Amino acid sequence: MKIGIVGTGAVGCAIALAAVTRGSPREIVLVNRTRKTAEAVATDIHYGTPLTPKVDIRDGDLMRCPAQA
């Protein structure tokens, strides 16, 4: 499963961390107004969770987010 999280504030970071810890998605795309912030959060979560299941977390834009059903 691939999830997209729009906004990397406190709530977006908490959702991303919970998803990584749980290991439910294979890929997480973080989208923010400033791409550098999304990239920094993705890097922090990636380095902060080395013993969790393999999840690819990256920054991106709305085009990389999964389509809604």
Image (spheres, rainbow, N blue to C red):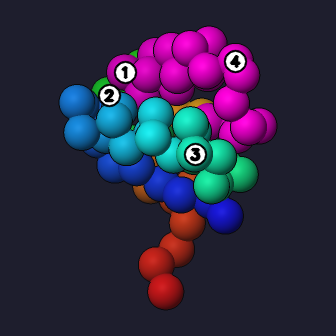
As helix, strand or loop, the secondary structure at mark 1 comes to helix
Q: How far apart are marks 2 and 4 (CA)?
A: 26 Å
Residue, disc 4: 50
First in sequence, mark 1 or 4: give its number: 1
Residue, disc 3: 22
Amino acid type at circle 2 is: Thr
Amino acid type at circle 4 is: Pro
* Mark 3 or 2: the one toward you: 3
Residue range highlighted in magenta: 37-57
Residue, disc 2: 34
Amino acid type at circle 1 is: Thr
Residue 68 placement (x, y as % from top left): 46, 78
Q: In this view, does 8 lie to the left or right of 53?
A: left
First in sequence, mark 3 or 2: give its number: 3
Res. 37 mark? 1
Mark 1 neighbour density, 10 Å: few (under 14) some (14–19) many (20 or more): some
Q: Distance between the residues labelled 4 and 3?
A: 13 Å
First in sequence, mark 2 or 4: give its number: 2
Q: Distance between the residues labelled 3 and 1?
A: 23 Å
Res. 45 mark? none
**Is 40 located above or below residue 64 in the figure?**
above
Q: Looking at this view, is 36 or 25 the one in front?
A: 25
